[in-house]
Image: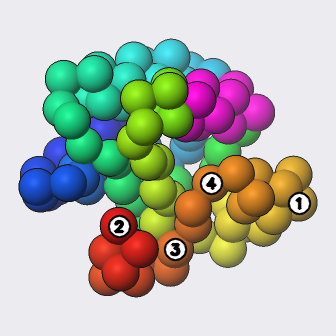
């Protein structure tokens, strides 16, 4: 579901390994990321490069993760969104609550 790519001093870079982010894997994703936030005093950068499709339940999991992170004074950053996924986040205005960057290098300048 998620793969840890980098474990840096102030953040962890994780990659979502599924192409369809949906109800079937939303709960597992949420639990894995919340566990990372709870066990490491770091923010999380989520690479969505593999995600071709995202549904409302998975979006809800992302929002729940963000709320958990904010309560812990940590950040959740989204990177490498496919055009369709990015357009959806813009349409439902989640770009106003999530920090979204084109790539990891760009995200690093804001961490």
Q: How many marks?
A: 4
Left or right of 3 in this view: 16:
right
The numbered dot on residue 91 is 1
Q: Secondary structure at mark 3?
A: strand
Left or right of 97 in this view: 8:
left
Question: Residue 40, image x and y in percent?
Answer: 18, 32
Q: Mark 1 touching mark 2, by CB under 8 A?
A: no
Q: In which quadrant will I find the C terminus?
A: bottom left
Residue that numbered label 4 is attached to = 98
Q: Secondary structure at mark 2?
A: loop
Q: CA distance from mark 3 to mark 4?
A: 10 Å
Name which residue lies at 41% across and 29% down. 72
Please name which of the two marks, 4 or 1, marks the residue nearer to the observer.
Answer: 4
Residue that numbered label 2 is attached to = 111
Name which residue lies at 50% across and 58% down. 78
Of pointers 3 and 2, the one earlier in the residue sequence? 3
Q: CA distance from mark 2 to mark 4?
A: 13 Å
Name which residue lies at 40% across and 42% down. 74
Of pointers 2 and 4, the one earlier in the residue sequence? 4
Name which residue lies at 88% across and 60% down. 91
Q: Is residue 53 visible?
A: yes
Q: CA distance from mark 3 to mark 1?
A: 17 Å
Range covered by the magenta-colored residues:
56-67
State the residue lying farthest toward the right. 91
Figure check: 46 above or below 69: below
Residue that numbered label 3 is attached to = 101
How packed mark 2 is, by other alpha carbons closer than 10 Å (few <14, some 14-19, many 20 or more), is few
Question: Residue 79, image x and y in percent?
Answer: 46, 66
Q: Secondary structure at mark 4?
A: loop
């Amino acid at each position: 579901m998620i793969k840890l790519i980098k474990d840096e001093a102030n953040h962890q870079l994780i990659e979502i390994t599924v192409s369809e982010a949906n109800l079937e894997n939303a709960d597992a994703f949420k639990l894995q990321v919340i566990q990372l936030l709870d066990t490491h005093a770091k923010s999380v950068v989520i690479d969505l490069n593999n995600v071709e499709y995202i549904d409302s339940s998975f979006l809800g999991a992302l929002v729940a993760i963000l709320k958990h992170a904010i309560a812990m004074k940590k950040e959740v950053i989204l990177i490498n969104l496919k055009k369709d996924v990015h357009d959806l986040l813009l349409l439902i205005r989640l770009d106003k609550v999530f920090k979204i960057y084109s790539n990891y290098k760009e995200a690093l300048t804001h961490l």
